[in-house]
Amino acid sequence: MTQYAADTTHWDAAVSTGLVRVGAGVLLLTQRDTAIRIAGGSPSDRLLRGLFMFWGVRDIALGVSTLAATRPSGDVPKQVAYQGAADAIDTAIVAGLVTQGRLSRVRGYGATALAAGTALSGFAAAWKLRRS
């Protein structure tokens, strides 16, 4: 792959994943109660409210840092790997919330599967970007 194609691939990955993260973060902050309900939890649960707020802020920070990696000397694969790591941690947290009964089994395990899938795709994308 030529240097130009690699640069374009890195830029495309950074912009697409960065914007998705910023958008998800904004939605988690502005539609927190709805997100908690979708995951099978109660919006009155203070732990869930705090956790979803944290995830919103964290996703905005991850998105902005990934977008910033498009600048010269930025490391897009590292930023995409950070996204995968965040999602891997989320997988364990959400599974624990289901085990504690804070999230319903069906919806909570659906959210767990989503987090695991995005973690795997983040790690795979980072690996592929490193090879390009």
Image (cartoon, rainbow, N blue to C red):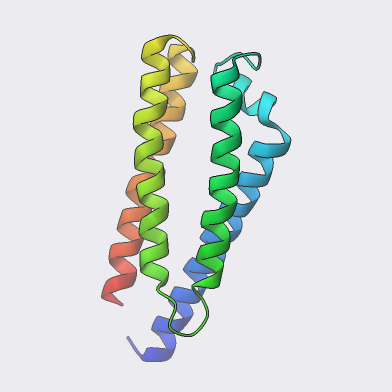
Kindly tell me whether residue 39 is visible in this rendering. Answer: no
Q: Residue at x 37, y 50 (%)?
A: 84
Q: Taking 25 as reference, is 99 left or right?
A: left
Looking at the rendered image, the quarter that the N terminus falls into is: bottom left
Q: How many marks?
A: 0
> Where residue 82 appears, x then y in whole percent?
39, 55
Which quarter of the figure has residue 25? top right
Measuring 31% from the left and 57% from the top, which residue is drawn there? 124
The spot of residue 46 in percent (x, y) is 60, 18
24 shown above or below 42: below
- The image quadrant of residue 4 is bottom left
> For this view, does 81 lie left or right of residue 10?
left
Q: Give the answer, above or below, for where 59 lies relative to 115.
A: below
Extreme residue toward the right, this view: 30
Nearer the observer, 76 or 16: 76
Q: Position of residue 83 (x, y in %)?
A: 42, 53
| The quadrant where residue 35 appears | top right
Q: Quadrant of the C terminus?
A: bottom left
User: Observer-nearest residue: 71 or 12?
Assistant: 71
Q: Is residue 76 above or below residue 123?
A: below
Question: Would residue 68 be seen by someone viewing this image from the given angle?
Answer: yes
Please state which of residues 51 and 94 is positioned toward the viewer in this rendering: 51
* 31 displayed left or right of 89: right
Q: Residue at x 48, y 12 (%)?
A: 104
Name the residue rendered at 41%, 22% in the picture: 109
